[in-house]
Structure formats: C-alpha cells, structure tokens
Image (cartoon, coloured by chain):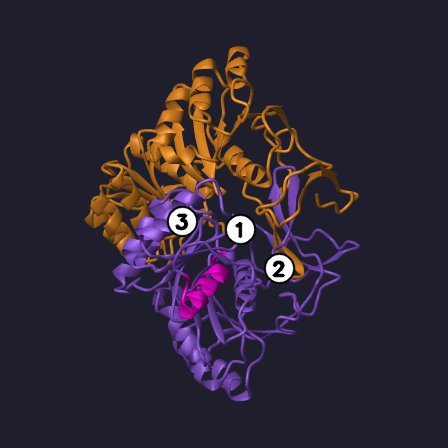
Chain colours: A orange, B purple
Amino acid sequence: MLILGDSATSRAESLSTYGENPHQKAALYRKLDTDPDDLINNEQHSGKELSFKNIANMDCAYDLAREFSTPACVVVNHNNPCGVGLAKTLSQAYEKALLIDPAIVLDSVIAVNRPVDAEFAHLLVDNAVKVVIAPSFLADAFVICKKSKHLRLIKILKWGYKTEKLNLDYKSIGGGLLVQEKSPCRMPSDQANVVTERKPAPNELRSLDLGRRVVKHAKSYAVAFARNNHIVAIGVGQPNQTHAIEFAIHKALRRNLSLKGTALASDDSFLSRDCIDIAAQAGVTAVVQPLPNKRDKKMIQAADQHNLAMIFSHTRHYCQ
Amino acid sequence: MLILGDSATSRAESLSTYGENPHQKAALYRKLDTDPDDLINNEQHSGKELSFKNIANMDCAYDLAREFSTPACVVVNHNNPCGVGLAKTLSQAYEKALLIDPAIVLDSVIAVNRPVDAEFAHLLVDNAVKVVIAPSFLADAFVICKKSKHLRLIKILKWGYKTEKLNLDYKSIGGGLLVQEKSPCRMPSDQANVVTERKPAPNELRSLDLGRRVVKHAKSYAVAFARNNHIVAIGVGQPNQTHAIEFAIHKALRRNLSLKGTALASDDSFLSRDCIDIAAQAGVTAVVQPLPNKRDKKMIQAADQHNLAMIFSHTRHYCQ
C-alpha cells in the first residue's frame, strides 16, 4: 500500500490492492469536505475489497446512472459506459443495456438508480456480475445477492443528492497537476435548438437526450446511437471521429442490431459531413452535436438532404 | 482561470485557457520538487499558449518518445498514441508514423527524441502541426518553424534524464482521489520469455519491443501491430479485447496496409484464443502478452498451431 500521509484537506483510506497493474502500488484518499452524494460515501455490503479499477469504473457508472430520473441500468468497463438501458423495472433496463453486447458484463461495474429488487438480484447472480452500485437493496434481494461470494454490493449513502459545491478533476503530468472543474453530475436538457427543416419527434428527442448523457461520460471521440430507451451502439476513445461512428455501426450490425430509427449523439462537433452521411445510411433519423462550428452550414445542409432532425446542444462534453 | 492557491508542495502556474471543454475552468500546478526531465520543465519557443488538452497529450507523447533510444517520432491525440515511427532521421520516422493515417496529425501533439533539423521542420510547417516537443531545435529549423504562427515549439530542459524518484498518478473520484505509482518512463526489455516452439527472429523481437512500448502508453484494451520500425495498426480504449484487435486490422486494411509479418503486442493477457486466431489470419507472425493466466496453455497451443512466436513479458500495462 502506498501511504502519502494525511493533510489538512484529505485523509488516506485503506486500499490493500495494487493500482491499475500489479507493479503499481496504490492508495485511496478521502477529501475531508465530502458531500453525502459523493461516491466515496458508500457502504459495501458484501464481496471482496474493491480494487483500484473497480473504484475508477464505479465513479463513471455512478455519475452516469444519476443523470437519469427513470429507472436506469448502466454498465461501465475501462472507464467507459458500454451499455445503458432505461425501463419501468431494473430487470428490463438491465436486459436493454446488455442487448449491445452480453460480453460487457465481464469484469464491469453496474450502477442502477433504484433499489435492487429480487428479480434484478437473480440476474446479477446468474450473470456473475462483480460490482453493483445502487441507492439501496431490498431485504429479499440482499439474501439472493449474498449467494455470490464475488458480488460486491455498494450502497451510496445519499443517492444523487444535489450539490452546488465546486468539484475538481485532476490529471497528473510530469512534475505537475492539471486541475479543472468537473462537469456537473446532472445535465440540463433545456439548452438545445433545432437547426434543420425537420423537427425531432418526441421519441427522437428522448433518444437524443439519452445519447447526450451517455457521451458526456465516455472518452472522446464518443458517439452513441440510442433508440427505445437504450443504447444500440457506442463508439469511444478514437482519435478519428469518423472511425468512432463506423466502428459503433459495425459492432451493432454484427450483432444484428438494426440502427434504423436511432438518434446519434456526439460529444464533439462533427468535423466532416462524412459523419452525417454514414449515420444516415445506417438508419439514423436524428442527430445532436454540441457547438456550431465553421462547418455548421455544410452539416445542416447534409442533415436536410437526408431528412434528419439535427440539434445543437451548445455544450461540448469532450473528455480524454 | 481556476485558482486553488499554493501549498507546501505545489504552486499554481498560468493557464489562461479553459479545461477540456469551454464550460470547465482550469489551472496548472507545478510540484515544487520537480526533476529536470519532468514535462513541466520545458521552454516554449513560439506559438500560442498551450491548452489543457495540449498539455495532457504532451505528457503521453513525451513519455512514449523517451522510451526509445533510436530516433523516434510519436503522434498523440486524445491521450493515446496514434502513430509511431523509428528511423535514421526524424523526417523518415515522421513519415513512418503517418503511414497508419495521415489524418492523425490534425490537432495532435508530436514528440521526437532528437534535435529538430531543417528537413523535419519543413514537414511540420507543411502539415500544419500545432505542437512539437523535442530535446532542442537547430538554428535553421527554428527559423523555418517560426513561419507557422500556430506551431508551438516545446523544448524539454533535460530530455529523458534518469530519475529514481517516486512518480504518482492521480484519478479523481467523487469525494476522493485514487493515487498510484506511475509506471517508470522507460521500459526494461529484458524480462521476456519465449513460450512457443518457434523462437522470434531478431526483426520480430524488435517489432515486439516497439509494440510493447506503445501499448504501455495507450488506453486499455490496447493492441499494436508493429513491423519495420513503425506501428502499422493500433486499437485503443475498447471494453472488448477482440474488438480492439479487429478494429485495428480493419483500419489498416482499409488503407491498404498489409499486416503480413507484423508483431502484435497487447497490454493485457489474451482472454480468448479468438485473439490469436484473428491475428494469425491477418498475417501476424509474433505476439507478446503480459502475464500467463489460466488460459495460457490454450494460448500457447493456438500460437503453435499458427506457427507464431509468442512471448510472455510478465508486465501488464493496463491503463484506463
């Protein structure tokens, strides 16, 4: 374990496991002025100690899950959301989240924004899930979950509590630290404007909103294709925006998931009209991108040619 | 600008630009006990102020470029290496690095481990490169580079100076900080052992070594295909290891880059023999993966069936 000692603003907590790799020692520090809704204010109810990777993935999963007010299931792996479903029940949301690729459950962290019930608990145990984060666990669900000795049950003390406090994000560089404000954990949905001839239908608006929330928490370039309250395809972490779109489409089609009628969200503005053309050919009917740029006339023209509805969200959510 | 104030161990430096996105304020902190070879100990010789994204990318580019003793050119975008070339001159190394995709130059950071000469300076200006990091700039190269008002010339005060100091890596989570030791900036090349019937040839060993150094600095799952002193294909940031391999192959083939005779490096152990089979079908002749795991017998068997040479490096370099 790596111990740096306590300071005026933070305190070392136990973390017996190593860092991202076995040759890297690691530690977890708790800020002394935490909010009740901070991830660190959790209770672990079963399973082995959390690893460095678990905690990093938990941060992404929790922040995305609390973006939603309807029941949501979020699957995170390698610090990227890789499956998201919204539904009336957690079990239905989980099934929607896994349509994209059932293999994503392996070594992932799952976050849900409703108390875990017995039906959902059975799915967790049957699929050998390792970490689930939730606002609480119903008594019968708790008994079922305890059957798996690997499943870590993590209860957030005050789920999604609204805070106005400045949250900071750190990136270490050689000899220094880059520090920035974190994006707020909840995205406002009222800053969008339609720029195309066709306006998005209510179901397209819902899908665009879901996609925007997902790409906000995914590594850039990130694109998400949403339909019927779940993510059908997602592309993350590519240096080339067109590749992110193409690979997302490729993955979906190989699993026989049609992209017809999906809404496409992008974390950064489209750099070439290829992006619009490829999306339209795959069946996308609505698009949201952050900021108008120098190319916005070309993009609007391309969208109009394909009869797409396009929205400018005015908020870029690029993250490395 | 975000100001947190100085402390006993760090001091705020100027950073007038915003963070990863316009709505996020940002700052840069300098540790008071820096080493001469730390990225922060640099001199900027021309161009606009560095942005948050520039500095984050510079950290990755510099750390990878100083892994090499032969002349190297590294292109980094979105905190991932996306082009790497080794050659007798920087210009040749640059051309090799860009074979993978000339578009990667856009908004990227380039790091080279030799003084920038006039020939290389012309390439930088002609291709509208924005940031180049080097140990120094020759006088005539400096004059050429100054023709571009956008090109930032960054000289590291003491390139690749050997330090034994503990370097730390931070990841902010809600209410806390995950801290781990950083991997050393130079990878030892003497910890590999051959596990297959066929031993790697000297050129395969060189390619395996190049690939290992690249995936160490790329987001997981990361795979790199190397041949003739450059990276032919790279897959980064995928939640599914097989997809990382498939997409890397797909990108290369679309640019008519053959993968015949390439060596494949993976940052994590292969989870299924699909990985070996797909690589072999694409033309890979040698493979390096970090640690033997429960599946290693199957993996060795698969490699032997394809007449691949396989090495266990015994060092995982997973990073999120």
Disc 2 marks a residue whose amino acid type is Pro
Q: Which of the two residues, A195 or B148, is positioned nearer the viewer here?
A: B148
Report crowding for label 1: few under 14, some 14 to 19, many 20 or more residues within 10 A (C-alpha). many
Share a chain, discs 1 and 3?
yes
Magenta stretch holds residue B21 = no
Q: Earlier in the sequence, mark 1 or mark 3?
A: 3
- Residue extent of the magenta highlight: B199-215
* N-term mark: 2 or 1: 2
The secondary element bearing badge 1 is classed as loop
**Residue closer to the observer: B289 or B175:** B289
Q: CA distance from mark 2 to mark 1?
A: 13 Å
Residue B107 is left or right of residue A4, and the answer is: left
Q: Residue furthest front?
A: B197
Say if B288 sits above or below A127 in the image.
Answer: below
Residue that label 2 marks = B184
- Residue wearing tag 3: B300
